[in-house]
Image: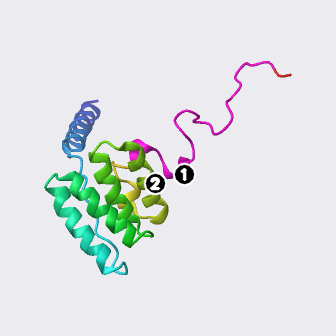
Amino acid sequence: MGRTVQQLAILGIVLVLVSATACSQKRKPLVPLMLDSEVKSQATVFTEQGTQAYQAKQFEEAKRYFEQAVAAAPQSGPAHYNYALALNALGDSEVARQHFLEAADLSPGDKTIWDSPALSPYGSPETKNRTKSRPYGTTRPNFGAPRF
């Protein structure tokens, strides 16, 4: 019986340490992403300038640079992601949502984009066609409604 109590005590200590470690981990800050190497150099320059502005909390300037990067590299998931970060920082959440989802579509399997805390408030890219006003698509469920 004494051994069982000792094992439970050790298990309790381990659980406390694990939970304390998990709770103490800080959420990673949202940072702009670098573009892929095959993207046009002009888009890369805009991204670097936008990143500097974003890190300096000059979000309007960052938005302009990232918007130019998207125009120069419209098929770049990271370019759309960066633009969405700036839009989100400025409070333009609906347009940010569109670009976060576009970034995810253009970058399938990119864990940085798909697991980003910036994307999570806008839902999973798999459910991007659902709207807030009609979360179940174009028809409403008829729970308990009589059928004619």
Write the residue at 39% across / 72% down: 73
Q: Which is nearer the eye, 102 or 110? A: 102
The image position of residue 117, as x and y in percent, is: 33, 48
| Alpha carbons under labels 2 and 1: distance apart | 9 Å
- Furthest residue toward right: 148
Q: Magenta stretch?
A: 120-146
The reply to whether discs 2 and 1 touch (Cβ–Cβ < 8 Å) is no
Marking on residue 5 = none
Q: Give the labeled residue for mark 2.
A: 101
Q: Is residue 116 visible?
A: yes
Task: Assign the magenta stretch its main secondary structure.
Answer: loop
Name the image quarter holding the C terminus. top right
- Identity, as a three-letter code, of the amino acid under mark 2: Leu
Q: Give the labeled residue for mark 1.
A: 126
Q: Is residue 108 visible?
A: no
- Looking at the image, is 132 positioned above or below residue 113? above
Write the residue at 31% across / 73% down: 43
